[in-house]
Image (cartoon, helix red, strand yellow):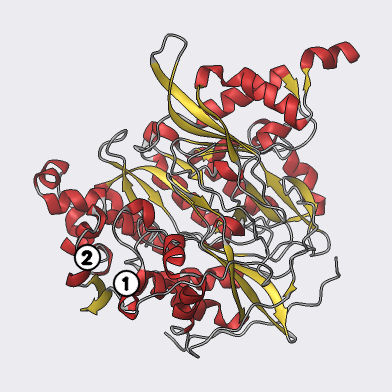
Amino acid sequence: MSSFSVRFFTPQALPSAASSVIVRPKTWVLAAPTSAPAASVEVDAVRLEPRVEERDGYFVLKEKFREGINPQEKVKIEKEPMKLFMEGGIDELAKMSLEEIEKDKHTKDDIDVRLKWLGLFHRRKHQYGRFMMRLKLPNGVTTSAQTRYLASVIRKYGKEGCADVTTRQNWQIRGVVLPDVPEILKGLEEVGLTSLQSGMDNVRNPVGNPLAGIDPEEIVDTRPYTNLLSQFITANSRGNPAVANLPRKWNACVVGSHDLYEHPHINDLAYMPATKDGRFGFNLLVGGFFSGKRCDEAIPLDAWIPADDVIPLCKAMLEAFRDLGFRGNRQKTRMMWLIDELGLEVFRSEVAKRMPQKELERASTEDLVQKQWERRDYLGVHPQKQEGFSYVGIHIPVGRVQADDMDELARLADTYGSGELRLTVEQNIIIPNVENSKIEALLNEPLLKDQFLPEPSILMKGLVACTGNQFCGQAIIETKARALKVTEEVERIVSVTRPVRMHWTGCPNSCGQVQVADIGFMGCMARDENGKPCEGADIFLGGRIGSDSHLGQLYKKAVPCKDLVPIVADILVEQFGAVPREREEGED
């Protein structure tokens, strides 16, 4: 695999143009070697010994490094999770009753932990015996046939079944029961999908520009790169044990837009387009992540790779993380902790020595992402680079869809577009390749007039919410319905004239990415006016995305959810220029 290479064409020249959260004091968005940290850290050679070794085709933690490891690492050692897929273990497990499974620690760990390597998450707390299934959907691109198949899966589960668009351009389907899993996996394969290696200590869905290939302003089409990344990570959906035993989850994105729709600053690895000596390639950002105890923006690695090396670089970095990463306290196992421990230059050298050529070029100064760029709204109707065609971005309220919705979306994609749908990190959907002559008819479809609006209200347009405690066992509060209700009530109080992004997350894990929002709500327990415990939220302010990205800061702690509406209304008036409805009506 070390010699893997693929040829890409160079794109045409472009025209110029008081919290527990730890935030780095400076933000780096583009990856040119400006003032990135180059920490000089003395690292003993013994520390650089790989902690894993290959045994019978799988990578296992060496015995001498097993002291003080976390419980999840012990589960991986006791039984290799990838065998459930690669050696047919899922077929046998699916035949067992839940009563049988619960009697044995190994099978209980299978359904609660190891099945996450197959993208299956047991909802033990809120949907006992049912699973959420997370897919791999590189660049968020899917087809009408795939969408119909997923609809057919969740439909059979009635009110227990639904689907969510995620903040990584992905589908998650809910309500799945274990006996159905082997058949579902076969069905996914038949329509060109997989759920393999999408959970736990694996690489998450590769994110790219949702307008790839159709945007008149794009820098590079990200689809070939995200597809190759996904194919490498899963070995073309057959399973890749070489990158399936990481210390923790790992996120990657390929940037193709000036708008930074891909959110590079919150990924473990972000490929930032840049030229060098007439060659097209990527500067690299590393280490961005959210967790319950720490959040960090990605920093420049001071490295540039030609486009041919997208996969070798990914492989080298994953191997460095796999071999050297800390496997103790799960709060300290993300890749940035390793970068901090080794220092940026030592980490860089460890990645370089795992490259086929055993070296990395220094970063280019020729970034292709324009630093001063006003982020464009992709919702609504917009012209494509293909003459006579447009794409239509539609708002999916907090990303939740039902089976009938998915079937209707598939029909619209076939009838008006090219049978394709694009998912976005804001939990919305884009219908590309619509002939301009069909736009009016599409906009008059009931689904787009009554439910998934191309032009929602300003506050609804920027609303994102994680799963919440309706299904997720880690969530402290309910998020999706509450996010919609609070937003609707706030809109009745104030009039907002400029975009404001509001994100909700049910717990400090921040799947809802509250730190990048203008206003973020992180679920917690609070106390009401009588001192009694109740659902609440920590409020974050000031997160930014795009060329001047930075993470938001804690504004107010433990606000009871029932008290949020007036506080949010005041924030909108004081900091975002909103006008109280009473005053607006009086002026009229």
The image shows residue 475 at horizontal and vertical percentages of 40, 35
- The residue sitting at 23% across, 66% down in the picture is 83
Dot 1 alpha-carbon crowd within 10 angstroms: few under 14, some 14 to 19, many 20 or more: many
Q: Quadrant of the N terminus?
A: bottom left
Q: Nearer the viewer, residue 435 or 172?
A: 172
Pick whichever of labels 1 and 2 is earlier in the sequence: 2
Residue named by callout 1? 241
Q: Secondary structure at mark 2?
A: loop
Q: Secondary structure at mark 1?
A: helix
Q: Quadrant of the C terminus?
A: top right
Residue named by callout 2? 80
Q: Is residue 378 left or right of residue 532?
A: right
Q: Nearer the viewer, residue 68 or 367?
A: 68
The image shows residue 103 at horizontal and vertical percentages of 9, 45
Asked whether the residues under the numbered discs 1 and 2 touch, taking CB atoms below 8 Å apart as contact, a structural biologist would say yes
Image quadrant in which you'd find residue 156: top left
- The residue sitting at 25% across, 40% down in the picture is 129
Task: Mark yes or no: residue 427 visible.
Answer: no
